[in-house]
């Protein structure tokens, strides 16, 4: 961007005509800070200063300086050779090493130097014709001042984007010296900047080497130029002419080629490890043997880095001998190391320990068990024995008072009884309670069990505080407030309940019941309420804490003690009576309810019977419902008279009950045919359900249902739906319950679709009779194959099996429309992967309702 | 008679000898092995103060938080410093950068506990010649800081001034405690 701004500013400077080329040249030198600017030349004829190098350029140079130490040179060279206007640029800048060229080879300084030499020969050569032209043109062409050189965008990018430049190293020096300078300057005099600055990478490509940017120039130029500009230019011209007319050029080229070839061979020898080895082998052996004689120490030092390799190699060659050699020292070495750095040994073997132990268990199980038993066997068996005894006891008194109590508790708490038993078997004990100052970790108050091991309260409190801080600092994400609530370790835990300036730490063993946690919160609440100010200003002096705080903790402690056996015994009687009372409280209302409930039901049946036996009401669904002292009647009757009649019959049989007559009198004068149609419609819908095959008859408000259902609920549902049809007064059903499954299956041999002879008679007949008995049913014939038993068991074979069965049935005169076939490689219903494979090579049948039920298919 | 408890912190760069100072103070022992402290280690020691105290409180329990040393990558967690009444800032005379860091540690501590008292320990004094010490002392000058009680050149190895630095701090803590609020 900055570069672009620069460009826009530049043209003004370009167009300024300048009389004296030499002066310009000097200016240029000054600009490039190669020589001081003569005072009188500082301003041109227009009194305008030659634009100095823009800051951007320095910036650029700085940036590239990171890329490689040679970069400043590159920048300079680039500046010189850049045309005044980026659009005129034909300058090619293959500054970068060939992508394939291995850059590190450039570190071979000698190679590079040779190359540089070639370059120095080649570069001027290619530039020569243009230089000549420039000299010719110098007189007529307007001389342009050197502007802040602008890099073509692309060049700049390439320069920047190739950090590999660094790989050129110090050896790839880019000489941006006076020669380039002069060339560039000359070029600037010309309208068509065409100085070919391509770096000759082709010639050296084979050797895979780097490229040098510029030609080396005679050193003599610099001092003389600074002494006297005129002389410098003359000198320059001389030099160019010399180069131009040089007759030795051809010779040089030839020798170049020879050199190149030699170089290649050399490089090959150096870079091909094999070749190099061949060269060096004999010498090294010789050297070594001599060196060992002379200075053992040095040899030792050189060998140290590879000694491990040597050992490895010799182990490979003769592992046995090596083991023998080392065997005697290893035990001593290990014990020495254990003595000196046990941690390191532990660290080294720890990862393998698990695996080793496992292996050992596989090899010598009993020995391992014996070895570990004293340590853990005891503990575990003791623990388990205790737990099991406790659980046994609990189970044994399931029907005891405690058992019932527990059942109730389980219900109330919504946990399983088993869990409760387990919790009871694992009693909890509060061991200690600390009230801790939150920031300092000092103990404000504490209680500990007198019988147990006493904890060092200050240390515990301090560590807990540190752990809390750590958790809050490192684990809780910033912005979130969460608290460490519990620290668990094996069977013990520490519960932390945190308030503003203090927190309670409860050290407990076993599973703490929820009730106790609530108690802990309650206690902390109390403490804060009453003692917040002494707690806040607590400074390590226990006397500043009121004595009345301690009972709160003590009380909490007592809550957290398990009922000791003696305590349980003494309170046994009390428990029993409490239990009895509780049981009574539960049983009595329940009994009353049961009694009432029974009485109500009896009354209901009584009323229902009465209603059913009244001939005029018998057809109408009227439901009596008795609840304590009221009798509710619901249902439908065709007219108000019958409604009254129902009430009358009901009250007659249940004196003393209040009647709530909800029977609705509905006019049922609908068209009979309408009702009949509705009944048919419902039957059709019902027939869609699997396992349902029914037919209905409607005559004058009465419906008769026949057929089969596969589920009992369907029968009820059918009757209910029909009863609800307006105009239907009664439904009589002769529905038969017939579970709708055909168990019959045909089994096949592997890759065969042929029905086995045995199945051709009886089994087929079964299917046929099913179809005969259920004319409203179709059959889905599903063929199965079992790819697991053979690759030949494909879906095609499955389908073929179904087809064979279908064909057999068709031969027996079954309506083709009632059979559907399909084939699948899935397992048949009820067959699982683990079952024998032959079970999967079968045909199964699934009855389906015929979708479009036409009257013709309805049985008459 | 009852025991007053005070929390103090040992702060400094890693490996300056905080743990060693505490060990020397409590156990009268020293080890050349370096086991870097992870997190915090808390130790305590009861200091008898027969001559001090109007209200008959003569026992001070020092709870010493040996906090893991700061490194280039990890500074000291401020929450470990909370609630401390005193601090011993430790530097290692053989590592100049640990001495230069000491005023910073002191300032950090006082920022969290403005009422706290601080002593400075230039530790491992056994490792440099005595004549070099005055110059090193200059490195750790914290100007005009009233809460800095004293600076000692200590050695956990020889035991030089170890008790003294703890005692100075303890005396001051009790004094502060006795002051009417
Ligand atoms: N010679 C000498 N060595 C000491 C002295 N104090 C500590 N050291 C040694 O310095 C090393 C570090 O000591 P620690 O006490 O572990 O240092 P620290 O400050 O606790 O280190 P971190 O816990 O990592 O922060 C150990 O090897 C000590 O033996 C001392 O006064 N003199
Ligand atoms: Mg430590």
Image (cartoon, rainbow, N blue to C red):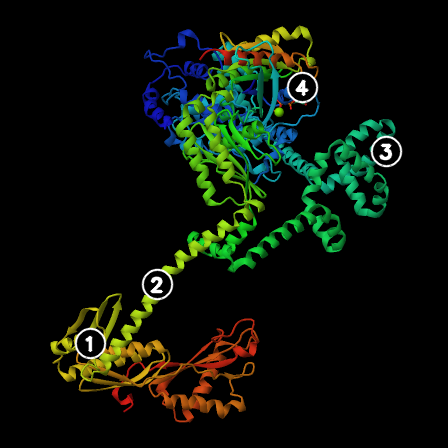
Distance between mark 1 and mark 3 Cα atoms? 133 Å
Distance between mark 1 and mark 2 Cα atoms? 26 Å
Q: Is residue A668 left or right of residue A213?
A: left
Which of the marked residues, 2 or 3, is nearer the chain's N terminus? 3
Q: Residue furthest right?
A: A293
Q: Residues within 10 Å of mark 3 (few under 14, many from 20)?
A: few
Nearer mark to the viewer, of 1 and 4:
1
Q: Label for residue A592?
A: 2
Seen from the viewer's position, the closer of residues A552 and A497 is A552
Residue A248 in view of the camera:
no
Residue bearing the label numbered 1: A652
Distance between mark 4 and mark 3 Cα atoms? 57 Å
Residue bearing the label numbered 3: A289
Residue A383 in view of the camera:
yes
Distance between mark 4 and mark 2 Cα atoms? 81 Å
Q: Is residue A258 left or right of residue A505?
A: right
Q: Is residue A282 above or below residue A231?
A: below
Q: Is residue A137 above or below residue A379?
A: above
Q: Is residue A254 left or right of residue A660?
A: right
The answer to whether marks 2 and 3 mark residues whose Cβ atoms lie closer than 8 Å is no
> Which chain letter matches label 3?
A
Seen from the viewer's position, the closer of residues A556 and B31 is A556
Q: Residues within 10 Å of mark 2 (few under 14, many from 20)?
A: few
Seen from the viewer's position, the closer of residues A745 and B8 is B8
Nearer mark to the viewer, of 2 and 3:
2
Nearer mark to the viewer, of 1 and 3:
1
Residue A653 percent across, percent down from the top left: 22, 76
> Which chain letter matches label 1?
A
């Amino acid at each position: 961007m900055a570069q672009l701004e620069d460009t826009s500013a530049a043209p003004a400077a370009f167009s300024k005509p300048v009389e004296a080329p030499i002066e310009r040249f000097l200016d240029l030198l000054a600009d490039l800070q190669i020589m001081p600017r003569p005072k009188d030349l500082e301003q041109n004829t227009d009194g305008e200063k030659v634009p100095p190098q823009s800051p951007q350029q320095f910036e650029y140079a700085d940036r590239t300086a990171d890329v490689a130490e040679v970069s400043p040179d590159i920048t300079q060279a680039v500046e010189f050779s850049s045309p005044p206007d980026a659009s005129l640029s034909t300058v090619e800048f293959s500054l970068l090493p060939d992508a394939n060229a291995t850059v590190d080879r450039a570190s071979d300084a000698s190679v590079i130097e040779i190359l540089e030499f070639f370059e120095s020969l080649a570069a001027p050569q290619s530039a020569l014709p243009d230089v000549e032209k420039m000299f010719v043109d110098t007189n007529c062409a307007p001389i342009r001042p050197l502007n802040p050189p602008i890099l073509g965008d692309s060049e700049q990018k390439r320069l920047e984007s190739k950090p590999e430049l660094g790989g050129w190293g110090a050896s790839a020096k880019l000489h941006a010296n006076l020669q380039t300078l002069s060339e560039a300057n000359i070029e600037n005099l010309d309208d068509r900047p065409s100085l070919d600055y391509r770096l000759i990478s082709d010639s050296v490509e084979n050797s895979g080497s780097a490229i040098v940017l510029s030609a080396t120039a005679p050193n003599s130029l610099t001092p003389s130029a600074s002494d006297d500009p005129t002389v410098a230019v003359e000198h320059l011209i001389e030099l160019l002419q010399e180069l131009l007319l040089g007759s030795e050029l051809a010779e040089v080229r030839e020798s170049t080629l020879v050199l190149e070839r030699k170089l290649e061979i050399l490089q090959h020898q150096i870079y091909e490890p094999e070749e190099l080895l061949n060269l060096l082998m004999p010498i090294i052996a010789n050297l070594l043997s001599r060196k060992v004689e002379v200075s053992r120490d040095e040899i030792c030092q050189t060998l140290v880095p590879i000694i491990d390799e040597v050992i490895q190699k010799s182990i490979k060659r003769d592992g046995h001998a090596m083991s023998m050699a080392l065997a005697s020292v290893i035990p001593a070495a290990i014990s020495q190391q254990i003595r000196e750095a046990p941690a390191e040994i532990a660290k080294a073997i720890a990862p393998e320990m698990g695996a080793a132990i496992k292996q050992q268990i596989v090899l010598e199980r009993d020995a391992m068990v014996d070895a570990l038993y004293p340590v853990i066997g005891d503990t575990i068996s003791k623990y388990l024995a205790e737990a099991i005894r406790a659980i046994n006891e609990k189970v044994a008194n399931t029907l005891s008072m405690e058992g019932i109590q527990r059942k109730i508790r389980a219900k109330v708490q919504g946990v399983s009884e088993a869990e409760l038993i387990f919790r009871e078997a694992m009693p909890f004990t509060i061991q200690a309670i600390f009230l801790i100052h939150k920031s300092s970790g000092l103990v404000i108050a504490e209680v500990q069990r007198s019988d147990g091991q006493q904890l060092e309260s200050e240390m515990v409190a301090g560590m807990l505080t540190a752990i809390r801080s750590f958790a809050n600092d490192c684990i809780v994400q910033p912005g979130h407030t969460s608290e460490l609530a519990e620290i668990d370790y094996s069977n013990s835990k520490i519960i932390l309940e945190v308030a503003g300036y203090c927190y309670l730490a409860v050290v407990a063993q076993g599973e703490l019941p929820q009730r106790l946690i609530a108690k802990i919160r309650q206690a902390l609440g109390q403490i804060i309420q009453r003692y917040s100010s002494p707690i806040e200003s607590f400074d390590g002096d226990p006397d500043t804490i009121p004595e009345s705080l301690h009972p709160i903790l003590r009380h909490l402690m007592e809550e957290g003690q398990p009922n000791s056996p003696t305590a349980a015994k003494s309170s046994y009687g009390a428990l029993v009576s409490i239990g009895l009372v509780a049981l009574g409280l539960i049983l009595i209302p329940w009994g009353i309810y049961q009694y009432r409930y029974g009485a109500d039901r009896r009354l209901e049946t009584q009323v229902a019977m009465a209603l059913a036996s009244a001939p005029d009401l018998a057809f109408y669904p009227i439901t009596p419902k008795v609840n304590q002292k009221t009798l509710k009647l619901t249902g439908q009757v065709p007219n108000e008279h019958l409604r009254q009649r129902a009430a009358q019959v009901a009250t007659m049989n249940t004196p003393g009950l209040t009647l709530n007559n909800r029977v609705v009198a509905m006019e049922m004068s609908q068209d009979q045919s309408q009702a009949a149609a509705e009944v048919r419609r419902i039957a059709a819908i019902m027939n869609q359900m699997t396992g349902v095959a029914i037919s209905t008859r409607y005559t004058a408000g009465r419906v008769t249902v026949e057929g089969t259902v596969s589920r009992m609920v369907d029968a009820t549902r059918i009757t209910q739906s029909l009863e609800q049809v307006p105009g239907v007064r009664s439904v009589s059903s002769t529905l038969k319950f017939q579970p709708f499954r055909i168990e019959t299956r045909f089994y096949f041999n592997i890759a065969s679709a042929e029905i086995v002879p045995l199945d051709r008679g009886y089994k087929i007949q079964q299917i046929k009779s099913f179809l005969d008995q259920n004319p409203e049913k179709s059959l889905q014939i599903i063929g199965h194959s079992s790819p697991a038993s053979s690759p030949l068991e494909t879906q095609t074979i499955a389908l073929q099996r179904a087809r064979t069965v279908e064909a057999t049935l068709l031969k027996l005169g079954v309506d083709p429309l009632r059979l559907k076939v399909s084939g699948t490689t899935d397992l048949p219903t009820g067959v699982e992967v683990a079952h024998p494979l032959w079970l999967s090579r079968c045909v199964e049948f699934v009855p389906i309702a015929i979708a479009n039920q036409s009257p013709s298919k309805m049985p008459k | 008679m009852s025991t007053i408890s005070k929390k103090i912190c040992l702060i400094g760069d890693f490996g300056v000898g905080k743990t060693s100072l505490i060990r020397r103070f409590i156990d009268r022992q020293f080890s050349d092995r370096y086991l870097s402290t992870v997190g915090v280690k808390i130790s305590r020691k009861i200091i008898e103060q027969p001559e001090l105290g109007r209200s008959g409180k003569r026992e001070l329990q020092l709870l010493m938080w040996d906090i893991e040393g700061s490194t280039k990558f990890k500074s000291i967690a401020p929450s470990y410093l909370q609630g401390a009444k005193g601090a011993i800032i430790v530097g290692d005379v053989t590592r100049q950068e640990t001495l230069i860091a000491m005023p910073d540690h002191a300032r950090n501590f006082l920022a969290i506990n403005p009422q706290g008292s601080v002593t400075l320990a230039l530790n491992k004094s056994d490792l440099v010649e005595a004549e070099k010490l005055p110059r090193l002392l200059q490195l750790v000058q914290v100007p005009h800081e009233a809460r800095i009680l004293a600076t000692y050149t200590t050695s956990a190895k020889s035991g030089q001034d170890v008790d003294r630095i703890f005692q100075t701090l303890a005396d001051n803590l009790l004094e502060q405690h006795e002051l009417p609020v």
